[in-house]
Image (cartoon, grey):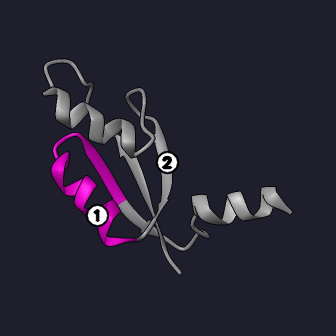
Amino acid sequence: MAAIEVKLVKGLSRVPAPQRVVVRGLGLKKTNSTKILPDTPQTLGMIAKVAYLVEWKRVDAAPPPSRASRKKAAAK
C-alpha cells in the first residue's frame, strides 16, 4: 500500500480559517513541515482543498497505522 508525503510550502498568514483547519488536520504546523499520510480519498480531498499551500507526492513508504489499530494495540 502506498503513502503520500505532504509538505507545507506556504505560510498560513491571510489564509481563511476553514483552510487552516484542513492544514492542521493534515498534521502540518509550520512552513516546510512534512508528514506521511495514508493514500485514501479523504486525504486527497483535504489536499485538494489546500493545493495552493502544499506540495505532495506518492512514496513507497509504509503508511502510518490507523487510529483504530493503535487503539487495538494499546488495549492488548
- Going by the numbered disc 2, the residue's amino acid type is Lys
Q: Where is residue 57, by image quadrant?
A: bottom left
- Going by the numbered disc 1, the residue's amino acid type is Leu
Q: Classify 10 Å Cα crowding around label 1: few (below 14), some (14-19), many (20 and above).
A: some
Residue 69 % position (x, y): 66, 66
The residue positioned 31% from the left and 64% from the top of the image is 42
- Farthest residue to the bottom: give it: 1
The residue wearing badge 1 is 44
The residue positioned 27% from the left and 25% from the top of the image is 11
Q: Is residue 27 above or below residue 64?
A: above
The residue positioned 47% from the left and 43% from the top of the image is 34
- Judging depth in this view, the residue of 13 and 59 nearest the camera is 13
Residue 7 % position (x, y): 39, 45
Residue 52 % position (x, y): 16, 44
User: The magenta stretch spans which residues?
Assistant: 40-56
- Farthest residue to the front: give it: 75
Specify whether 7 is left or right of 2: left
Q: Classify 10 Å Cα crowding around label 2: few (below 14), some (14-19), many (20 and above).
A: some
Q: Where is residue 66, by image quadrant?
A: bottom right
Badge 1 or badge 2: first in the primary sequence = 2
- Farthest residue to the top: give it: 13
The residue wearing badge 2 is 35
Specify whether 18 is left or right of 61: left
Total numbered labels placed on residues in the image: 2
* Secondary-structure class at tag 2: strand
In the picture, the disc for residue 66 is none
Q: Is residue 48 above or below residue 35?
A: below
- Judging depth in this view, the residue of 59 and 44 nearest the camera is 44
- Judging depth in this view, the residue of 44 and 60 nearest the camera is 44
Specify whether 52 is left or right of 27: left
The residue positioned 26% from the left and 54% from the top of the image is 47
Q: In the rendered image, which quarter contains the C terminus?
A: bottom right
